[in-house]
Amino acid sequence: MKRIRVPFPFLVIAALLLGSCQSAPAQTVAAATPTAAVAQSAGDYWGLVEQAQQAYAGAAYASAMQFARQAAIANPEDDTAWELYAQASVANAGDTYLQEIPDHRYRLPVDVFVRDRVNHAKDWFVIDVREPDEFAAGHIAGAINIPYREILRHLDELPNSKAAPILLYCHSQKRAAHDLVILHELGYRKVYNLEGGYEAYEEWMTNNAIPTPGPTPTPGPNEPDFGC
């Protein structure tokens, strides 16, 4: 039967998720089971694996995870179910993210960000994901510097509440997009990417006067305040 291979880090994630299912007593019981029962168990295992593979092929990733998890519990010694569970988990998370992307694709226009700051409409937690030398050469006031490759090593620096509004930016919006996806998958649902990046911010600040404080529209439940 063809096995699905995934990168080692995802296997580690799967192992953490299912680790409680791999206990020494379960393996001891299996070793003491009569031959006929072992054969039946093996049949059940591969039957569950096949159901998981079929669910995966049909893009039913949650079901694939469930079948693969049951298979991994039934036979924790074989890695086929573990690998399938890991891949289905990644696919399920990715599919959920893609289906929930709003029309603005989590991009916050520079003028909206500036107006929000002037009006204290949102307490944006700003992260500059460029390299330290870029940050030192100039950055948005109040931003902290976490290079985009290191975001997962500095989660302790992020707001305690995953509902806090977070704004990411790099030079032109490309690098920050990677971190945006990761943080959303970790449950930070109000993470946005500064549209155009620091380049667009500098251009706007050069060519426009800082707006005076004034009333702003109330944003929708899942929308940043994009009103005028």
Image (cartoon, helix red, strand yellow):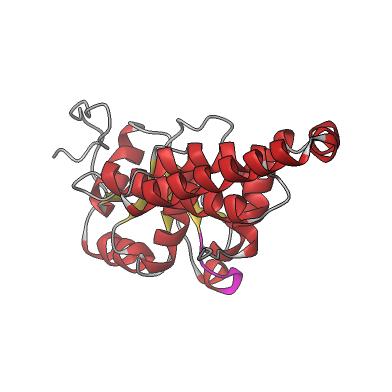
- What percent of the width, then of the height, locates residue 31? 84, 40
Residue at 31% across / 50% down in the picture?
58
- What percent of the width, then of the height, locates residue 187? 48, 37
- What percent of the width, then of the height, locates residue 27? 81, 39
User: Does residue 154 appear in the picture of this structure?
Assistant: no
- What percent of the width, then of the height, locates residue 199? 34, 69
Residue at 58% across / 50% down in the picture?
81
Total number of numbered discs in the rendering: 0
Please determine whether, in this image, residue 6 is positioned above or below residue 14: below
Q: Quadrant of residue 28?
A: top right
Residue 217 horizontal side relative to residue 40, left or right:
left
Residue 29 horizontal side relative to residue 37, left or right:
right
Q: Quadrant of residue 132?
A: bottom right
Residue at 63% across / 49% down in the picture?
13
User: Does residue 140 appear in the picture of this structure?
Assistant: yes
Q: Nearer the viewer, residue 172 or 181?
A: 181
Q: Nearer the viewer, residue 187 or 195?
A: 187
Residue 22 horizontal side relative to residue 85, left or right:
right
Residue placed farthest to the front in the image?
36
Q: Quadrant of the C terminus?
A: top left
Q: Is residue 116 magenta?
A: no
Part of the protein shown in magenta: 129-133
Magenta span: chief secondary structure: loop
Please determine whether, in this image, residue 156 is positioned above or below residue 168: above
Residue at 29% across / 58% down in the picture?
195
